[in-house]
Amino acid sequence: AVNLAIAFAMQGHENKVGLLDADLHGPCVPTMLGMQDQKLKVGPIGAFPALGPLGVKVVSMAFVLAGKEVPVVWRGPLKMRAIEQFLSEIAWGELDFLLIDLPPGTGDEPLSVLKLLPEMDGVIIVTIPSEVSQNVVGKAITFAKQLNVPVIGIVENMSGFVCPDCGKETHIFMKGGGKKIAQEYSVPFLGSIPLDPRVCEASDMGHPFIMEYSDSPASKAFMIIVKKIKAFISERQS
Ligand SMILES: Nc1ncnc2c1ncn2[C@@H]1O[C@H](COP(=O)(O)OP(=O)(O)OP(=O)(O)O)[C@@H](O)[C@H]1O
Ligand SMILES: [Mg+2]
């Protein structure tokens, strides 16, 4: 989600991208963007998002918690209320896109978001290539369809690893599961992002990978995925 948000900003939407970290139990977006010391600024009309690289506007539970070791011990209705407040009581300003990063699966957070924003453009489902993860993806697609939210497409992440020493490609989590399940459920396949240790390293350091290594195959994959998402949305709006 972090790299997609930055990719949107790089494709002509600087200062116009919002990123809501709706993973309430394990909010990682601020760390991945080097924003862990920021807080939401509060003004008379509500709270303002924190500003990340390229003016990406970020809201996360991590900005409201008293410390990084503080757990959120909440049941569904309270989580829904928090997400509702993040959506309605934050002065997001003018946005071209709002990305919402969700925890895996079909629990309270995705249900809240899909219920609160029934007219959203759609969902993007990220998977690893292996067969077991496809069961979870199938459930996610069915979930979106049941709630009448379009599936923009499937992204296969951690798709193959090219050894930097010998150039040999290894399919650590198998290959092709994302495309296969997209075909099975007749939803678009948006692309594959290879494993690249620099993705992990950059996000731990809080530097957006896609800005630092824009020529890498993974960054190119992110850029193509964003183009496909934009095409899906403009086709839907026309
Ligand atoms: N293609 C990749 N290559 C290398 N590392 C990656 C890649 N994609 C993600 N990572 C790293 O793997 C970790 C988990 O990634 P990510 O946050 O995207 O997973 P997630 O599906 O959101 O998982 P979670 O269950 O924690 O929400 C992060 O440290 C991230 O930097
Ligand atoms: Mg996550």
Image: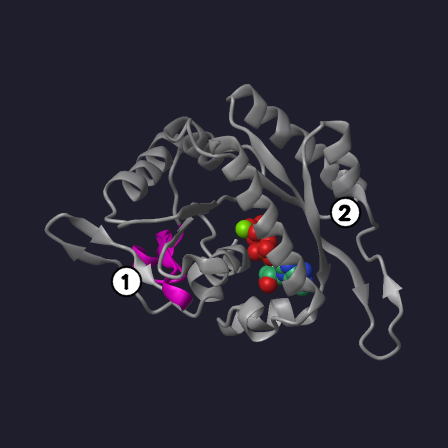
Amino acid type at image mark 1:
Lys
Chain part drawn in magenta: 54-71
- Rendered image quadrant of residue 188: top right
Amino acid type at image mark 2:
Pro
Residue 116, horizontal then vertical, whole percent: 37, 30
Q: Does the magenta stretch include residue 68?
A: yes
Crowding at dot 1, Cα within 10 Å, few <14 / some 14-19 / many 20+, comes out as many
Figure check: 129 above or below 202: above
Residue 164, horizontal then vertical, whole percent: 80, 76
Q: In the rendered view, does 128 fall on the left or right side of 212?
A: right
Quadrant of the image where one finds ligand 1: bottom right
Farthest left residue? Answer: 44
Q: Does the magenta stretch include residue 41?
A: no
Secondary structure beneath disc 1? Answer: loop
Q: In the rendered view, does 141 fall on the left or right side of 29?
A: right
Q: Which residue corresponds to mark 2?
A: 129
- Rendered image quadrant of residue 199: bottom right
Residue 61 versus residue 8: which sits nearer the camera? 8
Q: In the rendered view, does 13 fall on the left or right side of 64?
A: right
Q: Which residue corresponds to mark 1?
A: 39
Task: Tell me, yes or no, if residue 58 can be seen here.
Answer: yes
What whole-number distance in Å separates the C-alpha atoms at marks 1 and 2?
A: 36 Å
Residue occupying the point 26% across, 39% down: 88
